[in-house]
Amino acid sequence: MKYLALALLFSTSLMAASPEVVQYMKELESVAKTENRTFNGFDAVRGKEIFTSTHTGKQGKPMACTSCHSLNLANPGKNSLTGKVIDPLSPRANPQRLTSAKEVKKWLKRNFMDVYAREGTAQEKGDVLTYIMKN
Amino acid sequence: MKTLLNLSVAALILAGGVYLYADDDHEEGEHHRSSVVAKPLSKQDQVSAALYKKECSSCHMAYQPSLLPKRSWDKTMNTLDNHFGTDATLDPSDHKTIQNYLASYASKNDRLVDMKGAVALRISETPYFVRKHREVTKKMVTQPQVKSFANCNACHTKAESGSYREREISIPNYGRWED
């Protein structure tokens, strides 16, 4: 039992996400499979593109995730509207990240709306999370 | 005496009240307008207050509920999908908790008199706020260190704890406020 707990701890630290966030990603994966027949797993490269590209946001103005989060995920960002500092997104730089599935769901929904003016697909959300986990 | 005063300040802050000193403002009766809620928070309200603070202050200062009347907060909570241009939606349970908390501790005074029926979303739109900031120049507010009137704590150094006393004001690049 002890070893199981240790192994679990080790594997989650490798994955840079808590068990509940890993579980949420599994849910996203099964939805992605039904929405896209050619889906072959989440991809950090696609995630990076989603994260760094500019789109017409909710306000009808050019917007990217990096308008508020820094390009280097280990650095803090800054809310472009209020100026409030945003803690780093990288789970390595900020151990609080990707620990709560509730937080992850909330921010993915909000920020896809802000940047893409639509809620992201399961595949897009999984890709972005995969990108964040690897940085 | 000082401890007593501090204790009472702490109690007021806990209650989500806003602390204004009439003698600071040189205006009689200002403290009557601050709609301080003095009753101690119940366990449930403490949990709600913590949730409110956590959720709202991820993007901006968690403004004290007593800075706006209930109808302003209701309007804010009912339009979170487009909250000043951003999506600030919450899960249904948290949404309900926060809306109830704001309703309980909203200003009991109508802070929107003279607004011809309009319901302010911004605290800075309320007549009281406008009057209190009438001598503040545009430059002071739009400078990068302040950005807008939404950042109370840029100048009111204890705003986050609910204290807006004049002697605590320090405007970046301008210094203390001398009336």
Image (spheres, coloured by chain):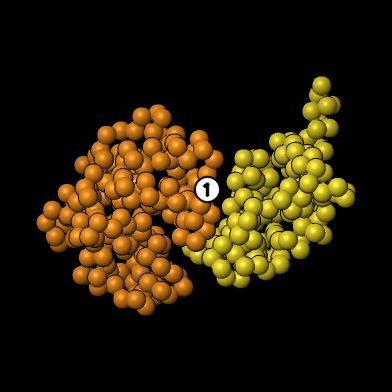
Determine whether A19 is above or below B163 in the image.
Answer: above
Q: Quadrant of residue B50?
A: top left
Say what secondary structure mark 1 lies in.
loop
Chain ID for orange = B
Q: Quadrant of residue B145?
A: bottom left
- In the figure, what tint was chain A given? yellow
Determine whether A88 is above or below A1 in the image.
Answer: below
Taking A79 as reference, is A49 left or right? Answer: right
Residue drawn 84% across the image and 26% down it: A3
Badge 1: residue crowd in 10 Å (few <14, some 14–19, many ≥20): some
**Which percent across, then down, holds residue B30?**
17, 54
Taking A98 as reference, is B157 left or right? Answer: left
Q: Quadrant of the N terminus of chain B?
A: top left
Q: Does residue B128 show up?
A: no
Residue drawn 32% across the image and 62% down it: B124
Chain of the residue displaying label 1: B
Residue drawn 52% across the image and 58% down it: B86
**Which percent across, then down, holds residue A24?**
72, 39
For mark 1, what is the residue?
Answer: B89
* Outermost residue toward the top in this view: A1
Which of these two is toward me, B136 or A23? A23
**Type of amino acid under label 1:** Thr
Q: Does residue B115 show up?
A: yes
**Which percent across, then down, holds residue B10?**
32, 41
